[in-house]
């Protein structure tokens, strides 16, 4: 039976009873048989929940999302949309009569409406560019939405004249706010300006629109995010903040007089700290950190009852995501849940005091749950995934070990499905990306790491939350600033040492793999130790100096290395794995998307060329058309099979053919 615990109250979730059948190990294609559930939204009357679930479509060679509806009293789930293009971002109209959603079934992303009780959908918008975020007016008469500016005729002519040549960093159109009258279908641009809007939220009475904007649509301009307020009747815009914080996720107070936002900042609004909640009075415009020194990472928040100054929020606590509350009268916070698993996409219906959310744990894929917020007893409402009940799934353990400097590190250990105490096993160490993230107790349907498949073939899987990870406080997260590949790498390697000493991992059968920041760590590992029999580096950085010019995010690298590579050249080069390729002996497999903007393709190519030139066994797989990870199903399946074959060959001397 699955259990939650909340401050002393035992919370029971229903257990489904299935026929007793022989269970089998997970296989590669099973990864694609699971639906990925997200984004529950409740109707105001508490009758329905809509959500989206993505599933593999092998004919289109990609995942496609569709809209589902749950009738809460009966818990009956119905799929509402079926377009090959897919649908997402479903919401109810304020009166609950309509369901709106976004779909690219007519090329660009547009708004569609359908009756909430079922029926044919019809296209509401025909905007010249794709629609992004949207929100209903409280009276249901309008929908507000974000869309990129169109090219003017002059710009189109100039583009054609120069043969599509463009100016670097000047080729992205800014994003602005529009509205559409639901009855007349007339579109109106409300907010224009020399900035690009990241997100927005309507005040409770629709008189104001708060939004976050940056100087351009470039990802690197996130560091220049600021909060603005548009007064609807007067059609005037005021800038509310002037700081170096990266503001995200705006929320109005219930009375519509002030704002809250989430930012990865400290009390002084200095950036690169664990995400916290900030209060922004419209009169003083001086943000206040409501959770100073909070030891975890805030994800999402919502207001409780209108009459009580209580905030509720989810937070990353390392290997789990829990629910918290914050009393604004005394600024005291309290953890409300102590479950093993993750909860996210919170959606609160204040009329019914009901919280809907997505939940997953190591043995259960994502599903929709709901509970009365004040009588906490979560109930599973959706059951779109059942395959897990026919599979042999591994045991997850949260483990702790001391790093070199005495830091108590944490991670997840996944045991082989036929684990026997006292026996040692080949180890696959999987290093998470970010590094501002953490591995968690959730069911994995990822082609990136697929731990249940490794466990099915007798491998021990180790996933460390090293220094630089989130969910462990600012000291942990900020430990890599000026010291990349130091304490973080100590945490990783002492974790391996711990498992070897415990007799769990065989010292002569070690493998290491990672993607993005996990790829950075893998590249550093193979150039600084020869303990591992094989490695797989996905989208890993090789040369921080060239990386800086190639990536779409520069500011975060400047934080890590205390300045730009032109100011602090020695440190940037000293921390570059490619500078140490002469030391590498570990057979290494490299993956990268050709169109990757975050960790660009040349980084993987530099690592490949360096290893090959210096005699280290290496192969490199490129994914044409893919960005920061293979996006086609066939690419993802091949990645897993090729990677598995690589480790089997070099760790167990087994030849596994790859289709």
Image: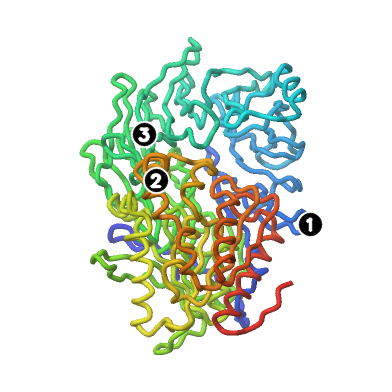
Quadrant the C terminus occupies: bottom right
Q: CA distance from mark 3 to mark 1?
A: 44 Å
Q: In the rendered image, which residue does mark 3 sit on?
A: 245
Q: Residue at x 58, y 54 (%)?
A: 37
412, above or below 260, in the image: below
Q: Reading the chain from its start, which is encountered first: label 2 or label 3?
A: 3
Is the C-beta separation of discs 2 and 1 under 8 Å?
A: no
Question: Which residue ends up furthest to the left in the rendered image?
Answer: 330
Q: Nearer the viewer, mark 2 or mark 1?
A: 2
Crowd rating for badge 3 (residues with CA inside 10 Å; few <14, some 14–19, many 20+): many
Q: Is residue 415 left or right of residue 447?
A: left
Mark linked to residue 59:
1
Mark 3 or 1: in front is 3
Instruction: Report x, y in % for residue 432.
Output: 46, 60
Work out whether residue 336 or residue 582 is closer to the camera in this orientation and state it: 582
x and y, in percent, of residue 462 in the image: 44, 71
Callout 1: SS = loop
Mark 2–mark 1 Cα distance, whole angstroms, equals 49 Å
Position of residue 627 relative to residue 149, above or below, is: below
Left or right position of 204 against 184: left
For label 2, the residue is 569
Does residue 638 lie above or below 270 as drawn? below
- The answer to whether residue 212 is left or right of residue 478 is right
Q: Position of residue 181 (x, y in %)?
A: 64, 21
Could you tell me which residue is drawn at 34 percent across and 76 percent down?
A: 498
Indicate the secondary structure of the residue bearing disc 2: helix
Work out whether residue 446 can be spotted.
no
Residue 409 lies, in percent from the top left, at 31, 65
């Amino acid at each position: 039976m699955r259990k939650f615990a909340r401050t002393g109250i035992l919370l029971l979730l229903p257990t489904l009873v299935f026929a007793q059948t022989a269970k089998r190990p997970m296989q590669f294609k099973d990864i694609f048989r699971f639906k990925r559930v997200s984004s529950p939204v409740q109707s105001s009357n508490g009758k329905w929940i809509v959500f989206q679930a993505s599933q593999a479509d092998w004919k289109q060679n990609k995942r496609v999302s569709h809209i589902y509806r749950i009738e809460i009293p009966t818990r009956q789930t119905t799929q509402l949309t079926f377009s090959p293009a897919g649908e997402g971002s479903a919401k109810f109209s304020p009166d609950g009569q309509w369901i709106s959603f976004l779909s690219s079934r007519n090329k660009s992303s547009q708004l569609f409406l359908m009756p909430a009780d079922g029926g044919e959908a019809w296209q509401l918008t025909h905007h010249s560019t794709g629609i992004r975020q949207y929100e209903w007016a409280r009276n249901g008469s309008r929908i507000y939405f974000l869309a990129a500016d169109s090219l003017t005729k002059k710009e189109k002519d100039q583009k054609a004249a120069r043969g599509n040549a463009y100016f670097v960093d000047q080729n992205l159109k800014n994003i602005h706010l529009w509205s559409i009258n639901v009855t007349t279908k007339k579109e109106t641009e409300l907010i224009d300006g020399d900035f690009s809007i990241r997100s927005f939220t309507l005040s409770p009475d629709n008189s104001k629109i708060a939004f976050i904007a940056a100087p351009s649509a470039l990802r690197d301009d996130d560091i220049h995010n600021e909060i603005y307020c548009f007064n609807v009747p007067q059609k005037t815009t005021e800038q509310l903040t002037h700081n170096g914080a990266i503001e995200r996720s705006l929320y109005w107070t219930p009375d519509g007089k002030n704002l809250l936002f989430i930012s990865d900042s400290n009390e002084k609004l200095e950036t690169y700290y664990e995400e916290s909640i900030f209060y922004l009075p419209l009169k003083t415009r001086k943000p206040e950190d409501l959770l100073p020194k909070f030891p975890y990472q805030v994800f999402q928040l919502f207001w409780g009852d209108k009459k009580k100054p209580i905030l509720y929020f989810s937070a990353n606590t390392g290997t789990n995501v829990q629910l918290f509350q914050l009393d604004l009268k005394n600024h005291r916070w309290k953890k409300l849940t102590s479950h093993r698993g993750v909860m996210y996409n919170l959606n609160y219906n204040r009329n019914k005091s009901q919280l809907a959310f997505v939940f997953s744990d190591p043995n259960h894929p994502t599903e929709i749950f709901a509970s009365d917020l004040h009588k906490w007893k979560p109930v599973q409402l959706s059951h779109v995934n059942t395959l897990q009940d026919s599979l042999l799934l591994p045991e997850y353990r949260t483990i702790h070990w001391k790093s070199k400097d005495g830091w108590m590190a944490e991670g997840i250990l996944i045991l082989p499905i036929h684990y026997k105490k006292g026996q040692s096993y080949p180890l696959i160490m999987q290093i998470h990306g970010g590094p501002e993230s953490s591995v968690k107790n959730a069911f994995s349907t990822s082609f990136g790491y697929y731990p249940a498949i490794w466990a099915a073939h007798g491998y021990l899987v180790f996933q460390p939350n090293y220094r630089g990870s989130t969910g462990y406080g600012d000291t942990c997260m900020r430990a890599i600033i000026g010291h990349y590949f130091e304490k973080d790498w100590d945490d990783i390697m002492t974790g391996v040492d711990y498992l070897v000493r415990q007799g769990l991992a065989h010292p002569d059968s070690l493998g290491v793999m990672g993607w993005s920041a996990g790829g950075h760590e893998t590249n550093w590992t193979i150039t600084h130790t020869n303990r591992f029999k094989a490695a797989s580096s996905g989208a890993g950085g090789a040369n921080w100096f060239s990386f800086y010019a190639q990536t779409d995010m520069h500011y975060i690298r400047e934080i890590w290395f205390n300045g730009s590579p032109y100011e602090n050249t020695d440190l940037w080069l000293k921390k570059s794995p490619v500078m140490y390729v002469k030391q590498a002996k570990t057979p290494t497999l490299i993956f990268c998307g050709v169109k990757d903007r975050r960790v660009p393709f040349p980084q993987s190519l530099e690592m490949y060329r360096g290893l090959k030139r210096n005699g280290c066994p290496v192969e490199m797989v490129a994914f044409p058309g893919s960005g920061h990870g293979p996006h086609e199903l066939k690419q993802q399946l091949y990645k897993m099979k090729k990677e598995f074959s690589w480790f089997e060959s070099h760790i167990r001397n087994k030849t596994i053919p790859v289709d």
